[in-house]
Image (cartoon, grey):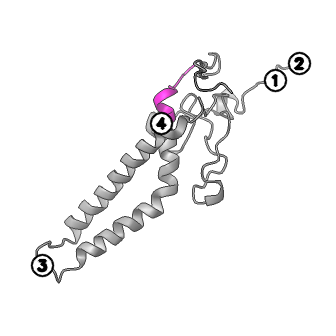
Amino acid sequence: MEKESKYQLPESQDVKRNYLSAIFTCRCPRCRQGHLFEDRNPYHLKNTMKMYKTCQSCGQPTEIEVGFYTGAAYVSYALTVAIGTAVFVAWYILIGFEMRNLDDFRIFWCLLTTVSVILIATPYVMRLSRSIWLSFFVHYDKDWRTNDIKDYERVNAIGMEK
């Protein structure tokens, strides 16, 4: 009788992913196999931020403590500023505009384009920021099948009493 595996994928089906690949595809940072989000399409807005409680492959908890993803807002802000800056610089290099000429409305079109790109990218950026934030605290374990999960649960109960 074969021993039943507690992991979703057999070892032969593991895919070797690097750090950036795991982050951009929103995978578990510990095993880089399981998906973090229940719905893989970030543009299904009703389910954009629904995450699994634990990784489906390795069992790593995705919410380490209460309010854990509050810090992801800083990552999201940095990503949004980077996107806005990239669009602005690309517009300036490719199309250009003049600040001195009041009849030149290209700066307003640039601003409208920047806002549009940021709005379109927001659902993915929100997921990406959570993936990056989680990877700051949960590190890749190449022996994730044999090593135990680190206990990240809140130890200090100050402020948690009734």
Amino acid, disc 3: Asn
- Extreme residue toward the top, this view: 147
Position of residue 7 measured from the top left corner of the image (x, y, whole percent): 72, 28
Instruction: Tell me the residue at 47%/51% (across/down).
Output: 125
Q: Which residue is mark 3?
A: 101
Q: Earlier in the sequence, mark 4 or mark 3?
A: 3
Kindly report the secondary structure that dominates the magenta region of the rendered protein: loop
Of 115 and 60, nearer the camera is: 115
Separation (CA) of disc 4 from disc 2: 42 Å
- Extreme residue toward the front, this view: 162
Report whether 2 appears left or right of 110: right
Magenta stretch holds residue 52: no
SS of the residue under disc 3? loop
Q: Classify 12 as above or below 123.
A: above
- Marking on residue 1: 2
Instruction: Tell me the residue at 59%/26% (across/down).
Output: 159
Q: Which residues are magenta?
A: 134-143
Separation (CA) of disc 4 from disc 3: 43 Å
- Marking on residue 4: 1
- Extreme residue toward the bottom, this view: 103
Q: Which residue is mark 4?
A: 133
Q: Quadrant of residue 19?
A: top left
Separation (CA) of disc 2 from disc 1: 9 Å
- Extreme residue toward the right, this view: 1
